[in-house]
Amino acid sequence: MPEECPIILKKDSMEEKKVCSNCKSDIDSSEKFCNNCGFPENGDEKEKTKFNFGIKLKKEALADANKKLKQVRILLYVLAGLNLVMGLFWILNEETFFDAIGSFFGAVVFFICAFWVKKQPLTGVLAAFIFWLVVQSLVIFIDPALLLKGIIWKVLIVGFFIKGIQSAKDVKEFTEKLNRNNHTS
Amino acid sequence: MVCEYCEEVQKEAFNFCSNCGKQNKQALLEEKDRREKGDKNLKFLSYYSIVTVVSLIAYNLIDSSKLTIIVSFSIFAIIDLVFAFYQKEVFSLFRFKRINIKVLIGTVLLCVLSGFLVDGMVDWLNTSLFGFDFLIMDEFNEFSYPIITAILLYSVFPAFFEELAFRGFVFNNLLAMRGKWPAIMGSTFLFSLVHFSFYSMLWIFPFGLFLAFLRLRYKTLLYSMVAHFTHNLTVLLIEIS
């Protein structure tokens, strides 16, 4: 009967064209794992749990790296804020505007770097770190002993930056891995 | 294609083996390679930044006499050359056949103009901020041939070595690591930082952006070297005259 034909065809194509429930790419029923994302579509429950557990671990690692990057961003906002306050302090103490401009400039650079960290984590953290190191080392011209002033704070900040660089690398790595498994969220 | 773990035949381009579920070994190795290369770029940049900043601080701390100027400039040259030879691909940016005469003339004219602009701005800034103007020649007056020395050390030297470093290997490493914009911004940022003068950032940063653009657009260092040389020479010649 002519009306039945489309139904039969549809049934056939349904059987042949199965899609992966994880990434929606085509998969044959003879294939155990999805060629595209590695999901054990035709595997047993244990394998599916293992796959999902792997995703969960990667997501946790990514969340952790993002958290550390957020801390670096907060540090940059704090540094920018401190520079801004220092600049205002210069002006209020009846110094000329030119004395304050250095601090304002520092504030702007740290603000830009904080935004940059959001867009390009590694480059942003590195730029901020190099800028901070240069500014810190400039005190040598005033008095080399100033390098040791507030050394605990300085060590802490260096620690934050180094952790930030590692986290930025982790964010890239785990985002790539999750992308491959089609789990970007 | 065959999975390297279970030897099952796979589709032409596959990420994961359909039989054992392991990731394509070839792709995995390529990814590892890329990551290691990225780490190498990062280490290279960090070492160069640290060495340059430390040596520049040392240079600024010592009194400038004839001997210290010559020694310091030689040290800067050696540092740049050592880093350049460590990544020899930077020398491929010195190809003369890529030179277009119109672009070259345009670059020279623009840089003469920027030299005049910057000179006027520096004069105005120095007199309004500090009450007097700083002279570049002050540093070179001790030499037997001050003008020739100034041209060599103030125009030729930075044009070659700063371009080799900032538009050369710093730019290359950033480009390989993060792409076009971070390479432009990062190299210019570092370039303006190492001049250790806050006010001069006002013109060094835009000028650095222009040089980075020349490097990116024409894939050669020769234009940016000519540009840097012309700009510095113009500033110097205005002062001498």
Image: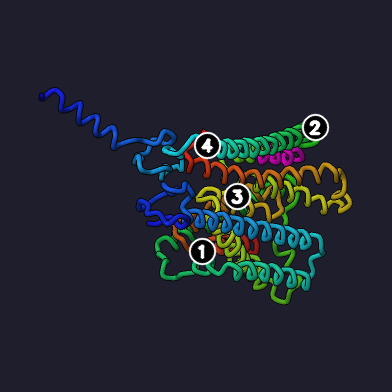
Q: Secondary structure at mark 2?
A: helix
Residue A78 in the image: x percent, y percent? Answer: 73, 34
User: Label 1: few (<14), some or many (≥20) within 10 Å?
Assistant: many
Q: Nearer the viewer, residue B92 or B87?
A: B87
Q: Disc 1: which chain?
A: B
Residue bearing mark 1 = B221
Q: CA distance from mark 2 to mark 1?
A: 45 Å
Q: Disc 4: which chain?
A: A
Residue B133 lies, with reference to residue B149, above or below; the image says above
| A109 in the magenta segment | yes
Amino acid at dot 4 = Lys
Residue bearing mark 3 = B205
Q: Secondary structure at mark 1?
A: loop
> Which of labels 2 and 4 is toward the front?
4
Q: Main secondary structure of the magenta part?
A: helix
Of callouts 1 and 3, the N-terminal one: 3
Residue B130 in the image: x percent, y percent? Answer: 76, 48
Do marks 4 and 1 share a chain? no
Bounds of the magenta segment: A97-110
Q: Disc 2: which chain?
A: A
Residue B70 lies, with reference to residue B131, above or below; the image says below
